[in-house]
Amino acid sequence: MKRVFVFEYLTGGGEVGSEAERDELMPMGRLMRDALVADLLTLPGVQVSAAVCRHAPELPAGARSLAARTGEAAVDFMAREAAAHDLACVVAPETGGLLLKYSRCVSPARWMGCSPQAIAVASSKQATLQRLQAAGVPTPHDVDDARRWVVKPDDGAGAIDTRVHTRHDAALQDLRARSARGQPATLEPWVEGDALSLSLLCRGQGEVEVLSVNSQQVVVDDAGQVRFRGVQVNALPAAEALGTVAAGVARALPGLKGFVGIDLVWHAQLGPVVIEVNPRITCAYAGLSAALERPLAAELLSLFAREPAHA
């Protein structure tokens, strides 16, 4: 029997900056946790445990619920339960170095995910784009006809604190104000076009498969605030250019392994332009096994298959 522990940061009791941020991100956290747990429960010889908190106490039937002890920090809870299982699949935001910190708190023999080195690069939007540019992968900085500019946290999650400006000087002012408040941020040309994401299965050594091309619902309100309204999974066929971009990302960020997401925009002249890389399970995982008619959880487990740690 292989024992797998699923820890999703928000539903596992992790803290966020405000109640508004929690309200915005919690449904996505629950969606990812429950989708992965449900997939794992279909596999023979696998015992599934998952972290819960008072905001998200219910799990798919058949999974074992685990909660932090009174006064126990989320990271300590995660590390304790990871050590008690054969494998740990952790979904946490890159914000504040959280995912990187968590990856370093779990034994490599139990960690189901990207290497800490790959996570460290992907946790910074600026560092990611610099690495991709050096590898010849199109990024927003290749857009030379920008009419709008976006300022966002360098390590942000979702569309939190992401604002679009119609004047470059206003964007610069926004960037400087954030820096003065000690908030690392980045300024990029806003890429006009269709917002997409790629769901990848990275097998290591630069080997990558595009599982699906997803349509993202991203809107900008009258104040310039960006809102993420959801994702339509497996919405489009995988064009050759998208496979080329995925391969370029895998080469540029060694250590990507398992399920990885890429956010991009299809620009009229440049084609696919990469916005960021998510070195973890994303919202697009939900329903993907059924859509593709293949057991993704089983494939993920096979990538990290080892003898039971308790044997």
Image (spheres, rainbow, N blue to C red):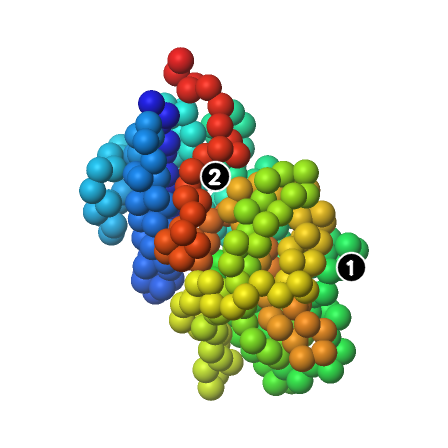
User: Which residue occupies the extreme front position in the image?
Assistant: 293
Going from N to C along the chain, the mark reached first, 2 or 1, is: 1
Find residue 77 and name its label.
Answer: none
The quadrant the C terminus occupies is: top left
Please tell me in which quadrant of the rendered image residue 244 appears. Answer: bottom right
| Residue 132, position as x, y percentages in the image | 72, 56
**Label ID, residue 136:** 1
Q: Residue at x 46, y 63 (%)?
A: 234
Q: Provide residue 247's location: percent of width, then percent of height.
A: 68, 52
How crowded pointer 1 is (Cα within 10 Å; few <14, some 14-19, many 20+) is rated as few
Question: Which circle marks residue 300 in the picture?
Answer: 2
Q: Residue at x 34, y 44 (%)?
A: 39
Report if residue 279 is visible in the image.
no
**Hey, which quadrant is residue 186 in on the image?**
bottom right
Secondary structure type for disc 1: loop
In the image, 152: left or right of 69?
right
Residue 186 or residue 254, whichever sits in front? 254
**Count of number-bearing discs:** 2
In 3D space, how far apart are the residues under numbered discs 2 and 1 (Cα atoms)?
29 Å
Q: Amino acid at mark 2?
A: Leu
Q: Is residue 121 left or right of residue 263?
A: right
Percent coordinates x, y for residue 298 in the rendering: 42, 38
Look at the numbered disc 2 and give the secondary structure of its residue.
helix
Q: Looking at the image, which residue is at 77% across and 54% down?
A: 135
- Identify the amino acid type marked 1: Gly
